[in-house]
Image (tube, helix red, strand yellow):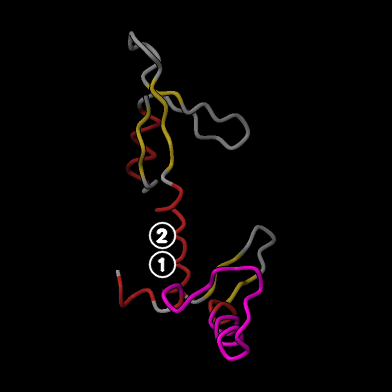
């Protein structure tokens, strides 16, 4: 059994209170350890988490990677424009809806 969430802070806090260890070095995603029956695991909804990252990136226009380098949203827009005008794709599925997603939320 599992509990799936989209990872807002309140849900992560709740999972910690229920016994999950969310440290990257030694994650233990089982919750309610003392409950009888089959184990229950905490699972991130990664599709929704990726959408949250995309929405934040689009809103702030720049994000930083693990090396503290900025990645500008405009690079994604320019890649889409280049692929559209040249009628080719660089092994990705980048589409109009990925760039202009506010219209279809």
Asked whether disc 1 touches disc 2, contact meaning CB atoms under 8 Å apart, the reply is yes
Q: Is residue 7 above or below residue 1?
A: below
Q: Place residue 69 in its image quadrant.
A: bottom right
Q: Is residue 32 above or below residue 13?
A: above
- Is 39 placed left or right of 21 in the picture? left
Give the residues drawn in magenta, as a range: 77-98
Is residue 52 or residue 2 the one in the foreground?
A: 2
Q: Nearer the viewer, residue 42 or 8?
A: 42
- The quadrant where residue 78 appears: bottom right
Residue 15: numbered disc: none
Q: Residues within 10 Å of mark 1 (few under 14, many from 20)?
A: some
Q: Is residue 56 above or below residue 45?
A: below
Q: Secondary structure at mark 2?
A: helix
Q: CA distance from mark 1 to mark 2?
A: 5 Å
Q: Quadrant of the C terminus?
A: bottom left
Against 35, is 47 above or below? below
Q: Residues within 10 Å of mark 2 (few under 14, many from 20)?
A: some
The structure residue drawn at horizontal position 60% and vertical position 66%, both measured from the top left corner, is: 64
Which residue, given by chain and number where applicable, does mark 1 sit on?
55
Residue 60, magenta (yes or no): no
Left of 86 or right of it: where is 29? left
Provide the residue designation for mark 2. 52
- How far across and how far down the image is residue 42, in percent? 41, 32
What residue sits 34% from the left and 10% below the top? 37
Q: Nearer the viewer, residue 105 or 64?
A: 105
**Element under disc 1:** helix
Residue depicted at x 39% and y 53%:
48
Quadrant that contains the N terminus: top left
């Amino acid at each position: 059994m599992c509990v799936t969430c989209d990872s807002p802070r309140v849900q992560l806090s709740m999972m910690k209170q229920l016994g999950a260890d969310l440290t990257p070095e030694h994650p233990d995603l089982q919750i309610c350890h003392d409950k009888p029956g089959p184990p229950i695991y905490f699972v991130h909804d990664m599709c929704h988490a990726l959408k949250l990252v995309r929405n934040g990136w689009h809103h702030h226009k720049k994000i930083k990677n693990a090396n503290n380098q900025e990645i500008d949203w405009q690079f994604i827009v320019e890649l889409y424009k280049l692929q559209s005008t040249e009628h080719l794709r660089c092994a990705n599925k980048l589409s109009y809806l990925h760039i202009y997603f506010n219209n279809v939320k």
